Amino acid sequence: MKRILCFGDSNTFGTNGSTGMRFDDQIRWTGVLRAKLGDQYAVIEEGLGGRTTVWDDPIELYKNGRTYLMPCLYSHMPLDLVVIMLGTNDLKKRFNLPACDIAAGVEVLINDILSSECGRDGGAPNILLVAPIMISGLTELAEMLEDGEEKSKRLPALYRQLADKHGIYFWDCNEAVKPGKADGVHFDEQGHQQFAQGVYTEINKILR
């Protein structure tokens, strides 16, 4: 059985932008992906709302992605693939980060995964780096993400450069998905379907 770890934030957790609750298993992209891949694949959900790349959040505690990443990798090893999509929460006004620093945070995580020895036979697992959704049409999150919309548009190119630099796989989800209209950040039901299809296509290139 091939093991795929999905490491991300609220869009991996499955937050419903309309209600603030969590979509059911069969709606979340991880659940849709699991159904598409079948019994020969284990899809491991590791999404957390508010998760950053490497930054401690003084308001929302325990959200630093790096502090949880290595224990997470070791608890789920051996891994064939890590799908990582983070960066949206780094756009929050309280961090005041340029897009290049958000990408730098992602690169720290990439290096951690590549050095983890949590893949098959003690090697590194494959990595699929996903550029997060470009936020737009913000509603109640507009103040928290002030200036974030423009920065989010710069992340796909920066992430692609990281993937090329480290020889890992890359997918820009903005090719297939737009944020839901409820809050301009989270996938709606259709978005989860579209995202799952995109990741499924990429996995078929990597692991099949």
Image (cartoon, rainbow, N blue to C red):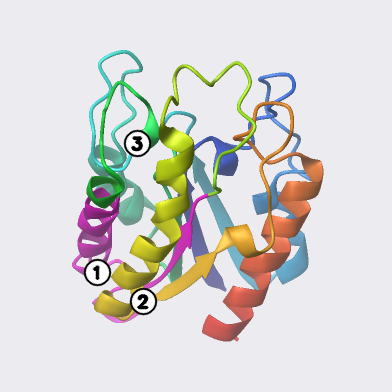
The numbered mark at residue 139 is none
Q: Badge 1: few (under 14), some or many (20 or more) residues near its Cα, within 10 Å?
A: some
Q: Badge 3: few (under 14), some or many (20 or more) residues near its Cα, within 10 Å?
A: many
- The answer to which quarter of the image holds residue 160 is bottom left
Residue occupying image coordinates x 32% and y 13%:
59
Q: Which residue is mark 1?
A: 114
Q: Which residue is mark 2?
A: 168
Q: Nearer the viewer, mark 1 or mark 3?
A: 3
Spatial CA distance of label 1 from label 3 is 22 Å
Where in the figure is residue 67, as x and y percent of width and height? 23, 38
Where in the figure is residue 99, as x and y percent of width and height? 31, 47
Report the front residue among 199 and 138.
138
Residue occupying image coordinates x 72% and y 65%:
197
Q: Which residue is mark 3?
A: 90
Q: Nearer the viewer, mark 3 or mark 2?
A: 3
Tell me which amino acid carries mark 3. Asp
Say whether disc 1 or disc 3 marks the residue closer to the N-terminus: 3
Q: In the rendered image, is residue 99 in sight?
A: yes
